[in-house]
Image (spheres, grey):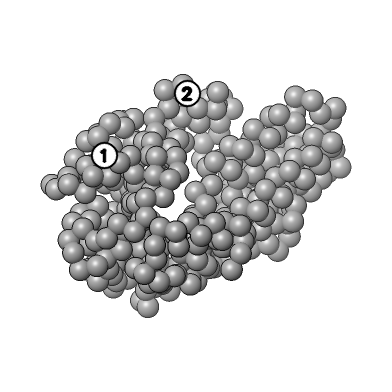
Amino acid sequence: DYLRADYPTCVAARRHWVVADGTDDGRLLWRQPGAAAMSNWGVLWRSLRAGVPDDRYHDGTIVRRVAPRDDHVEITLDDGAAARTDVLIGADGYHSTVREIVAGDARPHYAGYILWRGNFPESRLADRNAIDRLDADEAWLTVAIDGGHAVMYPIPDFDDGFAAGERRINWAFYAPQPTALRLDGPSSIPPGAVAEDVHAALPRLLDEVMPRNLRPLFDSPAEEVSIQPVYDESVDHYVRGRVALIGDAGSLSRPHTGSGATKAMQDARCLEALGTDAEGWDPLLAAYDHDRAATGRTLVELGRRIGRDQVEHTPPWASMSEADFEAWAQASLSGEQ
């Protein structure tokens, strides 16, 4: 019951791997099997928020001070109000300040490359040939390049529309950091804030590597493009005393794993399941720490392997057969070199 029964997703059965070969459509290298359900973060947030009573949700409130005690946590808010709670769960994302209480100096680590992002209403597409071909095979798209790859898949629109023509086109492009981009610690650049000289690298890259008929699927205007520098970090523990971490406030995996919101809900589900049987907070939190810290480390390592094999040290895509692809993917997932 975390999500309503009619929660919208766009489903796929496989992934098309394509490489530019001088033709308008590129060459289809691999039809990789794999079911997926694509979500819209805005719809996801709205659905989860609907499950929280308004009088329990303090919008815009800032926590100024956290003081852990042996059997409780004291919290001071920005208006001076104080609260005392049995347990504090830090769900404050990859910039988490609660993480400092649990994991000390753990900080997100920059992977050395970025993710260009954009999405737009499917109704903007003047040429539907590419999206219709993908829909006919229930597929989403990956375009492989030397030193990265681009992905595209439809997601539900903000009004929950998920039928063909009612969706949003969601795309992302893993690529080297543009020379004009300067990073100052873990951060992202939202739509409308990408500098003109930085954004100029994107159309040049698309012109160079994207098959002509696929280009419209990545054609967001500059003011709608964002940049997500890729970070990860792993923490040894999710719990210290009566303070716990959840979601990206704990271990942060690279976007390749597609696990951000999913892992956060799995963390919550683990707390819920343990709370059904635990005899008290201390054994519950100990069990939660053991389960989720290990899961977080596994996801971080998986993201690093995918980043290594699909961005940092890409294979000779164009010369690979389907058998080569299957062996390469299996080796990457299993941790082999």
Left-right relation of 262 to 193: right
Q: Which mark is residue 294?
A: none
Classed neighbour count for the residue bearing mark 1: other residues with Cα under 10 Å, few (<14), some (14–19), many (≥20): few
Residue 314: x percent and y percent? 44, 70
Most foreground residue, 153 or 281: 153
Q: Please, is residue 172 above or below residue 79 in the view?
A: below
The residue located at (52%, 42%) in the rendering is 261
In x, y percent, where is residue 144?
36, 63
Under circle 2, the secondary element is loop
In the picture, residue 150 is in which quadrant?
A: bottom left
Q: Which dot marks residue 136?
A: 1
Which amino acid lies under the numbered mark 1 shown in the image of this protein?
Answer: Ala
Residue 83, position as x, y percentages in the image = 71, 35
List x then y, in percent, for residue 204: 25, 71
Residue extending farthest left: 126
Give whichever of 203, 128 is nearer the camera. Answer: 128
Above/below status of 313 relative to 149: below
Residue 317 vs residue 113, the one in the foreground: 317
On screen, residue 133 above or below 57: below
Q: Observer-nearest residue: 88 or 17?
A: 17
Residue at mark 2 to residue at mark 1: CA–CA distance: 28 Å
Q: Amino acid at mark 2?
A: Arg
In the image as oriented, which residue stretches furthest toward the bottom?
179
Q: Which mark is residue 4?
A: 2
Residue 8 makes an appearance in the image: yes
